[in-house]
Image (cartoon, rainbow, N blue to C red):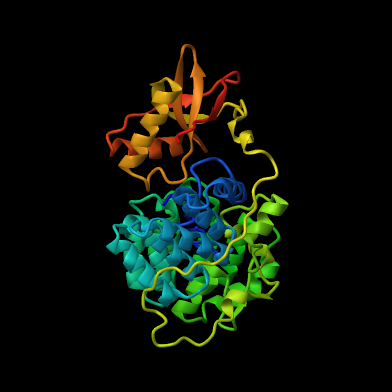
Amino acid sequence: MRGMMHLGGIILVCAGCALATVPASAQGSYSQYDESATAALARYVRDLAADPKDFTSLIGAGRAALVLGDAEAAGGFFARADAANPNSPLPQAGMGGVSVLKNDPQAALPYFERAVQLGATLATIGCDRGLAYDLLGRQAEAQADYRAAMSGPDRDEARRRLALSLAISGNRAAALQTLSPLMAKHDPGAERARAFVLALDGNPAGALAAINAAMPGSSDRLAPFMQRLSSLSPGQKAAAINLGIFPDSVTYADSAPATATQAIARASNPTTDRLASIDAMLNPSPSPTQQQAPAQAARHQWRPPQTVEVSYARPSEPTSVRRQPARAERQVWLQLASGTPEGLSAKYRRLKGQDRELFSGITPYLANSGNEALLLIGPFKGASDADFFAEDLETLGVHSSKYINSQTDRIAPLAVE
């Protein structure tokens, strides 16, 4: 799963950090396109209004809901996806992310175990499973998972989480060294993670100075948190810096996320890096997901995801709106083939059949170029993102080339049914 502080951001809010993170299984992985989680969720909901059992849309919607902090909606989407394709590891990995978001790491582990049995690799689930281990105070296992995930799509988020886990273990030097490649790129999430590393090391003054540099004017509000952080147990530290949850069950920093449907209704544009809202941290608000009943003995045995009813309505606009040409701004795409629309539609179905996980959440586009049509995917956030995806395609023997549209190009979604 792609993305940043991808479980995959929760946490995975798959890297950034806390104070209220998102599962990596969600972060950035909710869409390959340059769009917010809210926009992606709205797009998937429109698709599901037409086909409620579309597996790709269910997984994409679940991941987007995780990024928005709506665990119940995410669980509903993943449960429906599991019913549609019980042999895929993606719904199980997603349910693991849901449990992590609810601060129930023990319940998350059986889901990750099931995902591995179905074919998931540590490179894809390690970022989120590592967080589950961190929340349980099992830092050595968490760090092993993060290192495995650093070779996967959630590499940056995994690096941030590894640094925080090393700091929880008392290894400040290794934590800062781990962050150095991201710091060199002026990564905002790494700068905030560095502040937490200093706080975990018992240096609240240095942490506040780092936070003030990243978010001017925030140090006064964050001082009580930073001063208290080093006194917590390892698992409590992980919950505090990744989920914004303290031992008293009070959740900080953007702890009451809007539901997915509310987010769509207000058409907001939330960032996938929940740390960015850290200066709201000392406004406590009880989180319903933290008011959990006592666990029973069989609670943490693996069980299929339970369907949660998630309401979504058909779009008020006619579905034909999806066939309107995309905006003409210059954007980065990958060209997979050229030919007739009918031939390209069949070509894309064959490509997707080679690796449905890789193409999960991808919508093919058709661009007119002279006497032939071009099969495109994208647009990507930048050339580097396109390069990463092109490398993944090469592993399937699929050759692609970068395509930057002109302002006169007409690009529209390709019908593949």
Left or right: 41 as drawn, with respect to 216 = left
Residue shown at the point (52%, 81%) measured from the top left: 231
Q: Is residue 325 above or below residue 391?
A: above
In this view of the protein, which residue sits in the foreground, 64 or 349?
349
Image quadrant in which the C terminus is located: top left
**How far across and how far down the image is residue 47, in percent?**
55, 45
Q: Quadrant of residue 211?
A: bottom right
Residue shown at the point (62%, 76%) measured from the top left: 288
In this view of the protein, which residue sits in the foreground, 206 or 240?
240
Res. 205 in view: yes
**How far across and how far down the image is residue 318, in percent?**
66, 38
**How far across and how far down the image is residue 40, in percent?**
57, 47
- Outermost residue to the top: 371
Left or right: 44 as drawn, with respect to 127 = right
Q: Is residue 200 above or below residue 273?
A: below
Label total for image: 0
Q: Is residue 194 above or below residue 291?
A: above
Res. 27 in view: no
**How far across and how far down the image is residue 170, in percent?**
41, 73
In this view of the protein, which residue sits in the foreground, 247 or 172?
247
Residue shown at the point (41%, 58%) measured from the top left: 158
